[in-house]
Image (cartoon, rainbow, N blue to C red):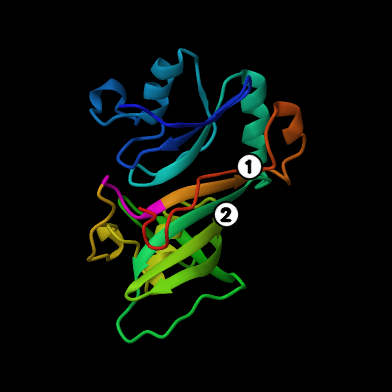
Amino acid sequence: MHIPLVLKNSHFVVVNKPAGTLSVPSRMGKADPRPVAGMLLQEQIGQRLFPIHRLDEEVSGILMFALTEAAHKVANRWFELHEIVKTYEAKSLTPKDEIISPSPEAILWECQLMRGKKRAYEAKYGKKSLTKAKLIICQNDTSIWHLQPLTGRSHQLRYEMAKHGFPIDGDTLYGSNRPGPTSGGICLRAVKLDFTQASGYKDFELPASISLESLAPVSHF
């Protein structure tokens, strides 16, 4: 399996991770037969990689690895301090008879989230979860959303979309009854990393932002 490159310099490599691949090896290691994007990429470019962040197996899109220990240390701090703004794109069914329209302003979704064995759920003592959600397109029975997680809770975006009545296409775990993309996985992908708030990003030869090219409306997946 070929992992598409989005950017590569002497410090980092950024790829468009296919749905259906793990970002890094699971706890099972080599006993797990699922493809691992990081391992495939190491073989592809012939260099050691240092994982920085992860995407769920079902999620596609922008995934970043460091090529040096120094870059790895700095980038980990960027993500821990939420200095890198991540934007995801999601496609969902618009509930029947629901009247909604795109808005120029993002909505702030907030809850107390915990992770069970398979899925996330709300609980009084859960960790605070914050998400900016913006409806981009509402066409026929389909909605396209841009989502920015302000916290890093497991399944945060998938849970919030389902909670607000818009389970992501293909995400049967959170109540979707529509198929996902033809390539597999669910209709959620990481489409942009913004580095403008990341201290010293220019020292690592990074642009202000990295994004995937937009496709035709409702054809993103």
Can you give x and y, in whole percent of width and height, for residue 24 in the image?
Answer: 41, 30
- 29 vs 4, left or right, is left
Q: For mark 2, what is the residue?
A: 151
Element assignment for label 2: loop
Can you give x and y, in whole percent of width and height, for residue 147 in the image?
Answer: 52, 60
Looking at the rendered structure, the kind of residue marked 1 is Glu
Which residue occupies 40% across, 18% down? 44
- Can you say whether 167 is above or below 80 in the image? below
Tally the numbered discs: 2
Looking at the rendered structure, the kind of residue marked 2 is Thr
Magenta segment: 183-188
- 187 vs 153, left or right, is left
Which residue occupies 42% across, 26% down? 38
Which residue occupies 31% across, 50% down? 117
Q: Residue furthest front?
A: 216
Q: Main secondary structure of the magenta part?
A: loop
Q: Residue furthest top?
A: 46
Residue 78 lies in what quarter of the image? top right
Element assignment for label 1: helix
- 31 vs 195, left or right, is left
Residue 122 visible? no
Q: Earlier in the sequence, mark 2 or mark 1?
A: 1
- Can you say whether 21 is above or below 137 in the image? above
Q: For mark 1, what is the residue?
A: 80
Residue 151 within the magenta-colored segment of the rendering: no
Q: CA distance from mark 2 to mark 1?
A: 10 Å
Residue 186 within the magenta-colored segment of the rendering: yes
